[in-house]
Image: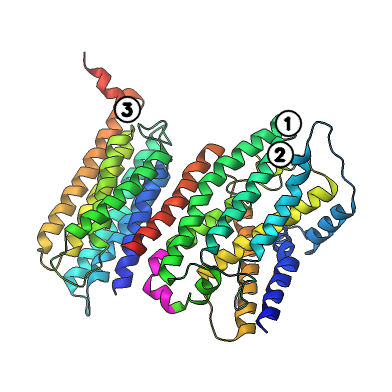
Amino acid sequence: MNNTVDMIMIFLVLTNLALLGLSRLGACIRVAAVQGIVLGMLPLALNRGDIPLHLGLYSAVLIGLKGIVFPWVLLRLLKELKTRREIEPFVGYGTSIALGMAAFVSCIWLGHRLPLPEPGMSALIVPAAFFTIVTGLFLTVSRKKALTQAIGYLVLENGISAFGAAVVETQPLLIELGILLDAFMAVFVMGIAIFHINREFDHIDADKLSSLRT
Amino acid sequence: MVILLKILNLAVTLTAAPLLLGIIIRVKAWFAGRTGQPLLQPYYDIWKLLRKGTVYSVSTSWVFRAGPLVSLAVTLTAALLLPMGGLPAVFAFDGDFLVFVYLLGLLRFFMIVSALDTGSSFEGMGSSREAAFSALCEPALLIGLAAIAKITGHASLTPMAASLQPALWTAAGPAFVLVGFALIIVFLSENCRIPVDDPTTHLELTMIHEAMVLDHGGLDLGMLQYAAALKMWLLGLVLVGVVVPIHSGFLCLDTAATLLCMGLLAVLVGIVESSMARIRLLRIPPLLIGAAALSVLALVLVYR
C-alpha cells in the first residue's frame, strides 16, 4: 500500500515539474487535471483495509471536480482567449525547473522536521505536498498570464488537499468538502474575472494591469 | 568459461549494434506505409563506406583525421565496460560507471574538435549545439547511474546489473521509474533521435549530429557511423538493464530477453519518431534539464 502512495507522491512531484517547464496553457491545464485525478485517488490509497463509503464519495467528488470540472471551465475559457502560451514569464522554464528541484530538496528537509501524527505513513507525503504548495505559489508569482496564475492557485489547492489527505482520518470530512467548495467557487470567479479582463483589454497579461494606476 | 562469456558479450555488441538502426528505420517505413530498406542496410552502408578512400581538405589538420579514429576507439573501450543480460563485461572495477560516462564525454569532445577543425561555420553550429545539449545530458546520465549504484550498493556496472533484482524494483520503484524516464530522454538526445535531433535531415539549420560529420567521408564516415551505432547500442543496454531487470538464473534466457528488449527499444524509438515532431531548439534545454531533474530526484529519494 505504501508503495502506491509513494508512486502517487512521485507522480505529484513529476506533474509539478512539468507545470514548471510547460509554456502552452492548454497543456498546463491538462497536466493540472491529471494531477487532480491522481490526487483524488490518494485517500483511497492511504486507506488500509476496507474503503468506507464517505471516503469513496470524497474521492469521487475530488476526481470529478479537479479532474473534470475545473479543467473543463479553464479549457472553455482558453477557447475564448487569443493567448495559447505563456510568453516571456518572469522566470524562464529551465530556471523554473532548477528552482523547483532546489525547492523539493528543501521540502524533503522540511519533511524530516515535520513528522506525521501517525507512524508508518509514506515519508514522501509531507515533502511532496509542500512541494506542490510551493509550486502553486511559484506559478502564481512567476507567470504573467492570469490563466496560468489561476492554474497556480489550483495546484496550490492540490498541495493543501494532499496534505489534508494524509490526516483525513483525524480531520472531519466536512472541512475537506468546505475547502473543495471554496476552490470550486474560486475557479468560477477567476474564470469569470479572466473572461472579463480579456473582453476589456484584449489580453490576460496580469503584469500590464499594474500600469492602469494613474 | 567466464572469459568465453566476456568475449561473447563483446562479439554480440560489435555485430548487433547497427541492427538497432535498421529496425528503427524499418519501423518508421512501416508507419509511413512503405516497405523500407532491408533490415541489414546499415551494415551495407558501413561496409560500403569502409571500402572507400578518404579526401581531406587542405585546411584541416591532424585533429580532423584523429576525430573518427579516437571516436571509434573510445566507443570500443566503453563497450568493454557494459554487461549484457547474463553476460559479464570484459572489464569490471569499482567506479567503472564513471569511466563509462566520461568515455562517452571523450567521444563527444573529439567529435566536436574534429568538426571545429574544418573551420566550416556549419559544423561549428552543430558542435555548439552538441556541446550545449550533451552538457545537459551528462548530469542526467551520471546522476541516474549514481542513484542506481546507491540502490544496489555496487559501484561497478557488472555487479550493479547482477543485483538489479525485481525485488529491488518493488522496494525502490519510484527511483527506478524516475531514472528510467531520465535515461529514455538521454538515450533519445544522445543518439540524435527525434524529439531532439532529426537524423534524416541533411543540410538543415536544425540538425546537430549530422552537421558535425558533414566533412568526413569514406573510411572516416564509416568509422563515425559505426561508432554512433555502437553508442546507441551501449546506451540502449544501460536503459534496458535498468528498466527490465530480468534474472531468471538461466544465462541464455537472460541474454535472449535482453536482446529482445533491445529490439523492442528500437521499435519504441521508431514509434516515437513516427508519431512525434522534433521539438523546437529552444525547448530542448528545458527537456534535458527536466531529465537531469528526474535523476536528481531519484538520487534524493534514494538518499532520503
Residue B114 placed where, x, y %? 72, 40
Q: Split into 4 quadrants, where in the image is the C terminus of chain A?
A: top left
Q: Quadrant of residue A111?
A: bottom left
User: Label 3: few (<14), some or many (≥20) within 10 Å?
Assistant: few
Write down the residue under mark 2: B115
The chain carrying label 3 is A
Callouts 1 and 2 close, C-beta under 8 Å: yes
Residue A188 placed where, x, y %? 23, 43
User: Label 2: few (<14), some or many (≥20) within 10 Å?
Assistant: many
Q: Mark 3 or 2, which is nearer the eye?
A: 2
Q: Quadrant of residue B2?
A: bottom right
Q: Which residues are magenta?
A: B167-177
Say which residue appears at 15% left-offset and 58% top-offset: A177
Q: CA distance from mark 3 to mark 2?
A: 54 Å
Q: CA distance from mark 3 to mark 1?
A: 52 Å
Write down the residue under mark 1: B120
The chain carrying label 1 is B
Mark 1 is on which residue type?
Ser
Mark 2 is on which residue type?
Ala
Residue B169 placed where, x, y %? 43, 73
The answer to whether tags 3 and 2 share a subunit is no
Callouts 3 and 1 close, C-beta under 8 Å: no
Write down the residue under mark 3: A199
Say which residue appears at 72% left-offset and 35% top-offset: B117
Q: Is residue B178 left or right of residue B301?
A: right
